[in-house]
Image: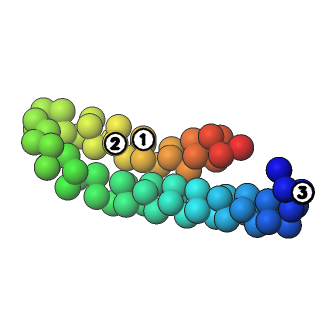
Amino acid sequence: GAGDEVHVRKTIANSIYILATSAVAVSILGVIFAPDILKLLNTPDRIYEDALLYLRTTCAGIPPIAAYNGI
């Protein structure tokens, strides 16, 4: 609104950096700690393997979803 294009560009760039960094970090942590998360949730043994695959797949998809929402 103030006509300060330089500040606007810096703000947008910083937003993209924060979005990308946090999405990748959450994705990696989710994939690595998925077994621990499922144990904390007391996931039944009969569905544990399917739940693990689902959770890891969901966490691996966080960066593309964040990119889509960021754009």
| Label 2 to label 3: alpha-carbon separation | 45 Å
Camera-nearest residue between 19 and 51: 19
| Label 2 to label 1: alpha-carbon separation | 5 Å
Q: Determine the residue positioned at 72% across, 62% down.
A: 11
Q: Which residue is mark 3?
A: 3
Is residue 2 shown above or below 70?
Answer: below
| Label 1 to label 3: alpha-carbon separation | 41 Å
SS for callout 2:
helix
Q: Is residue 20 visible?
A: no
Q: Earlier in the sequence, mark 2 or mark 3?
A: 3
Query: Can you tell which mark lies on residue 58?
Result: 1
Q: Is residue 20 left or right of residue 5?
A: left
The residue lying furthest to the top in this view is 46
Camera-nearest residue between 46 and 29: 29
Hey, what amino acid is under mark 1? Thr
The residue lying furthest to the front in this view is 2
**Residue 20 location in percent, x, y?**
59, 59
Are the residues at dot 2 and dot 1 in contact (C-beta closer than 8 Å)?
Answer: yes
Q: Which residue is mark 2?
A: 55
Q: Determine the residue positioned at 89% across, 57% down.
A: 3
Q: Is residue 2 left or right of residue 52?
A: right
Q: Determine the residue positioned at 42% across, 41% down.
A: 58
Hey, what amino acid is under mark 3? Gly
Judged by depth in the image, the label closer to the viewer, 2 or 3, is 3
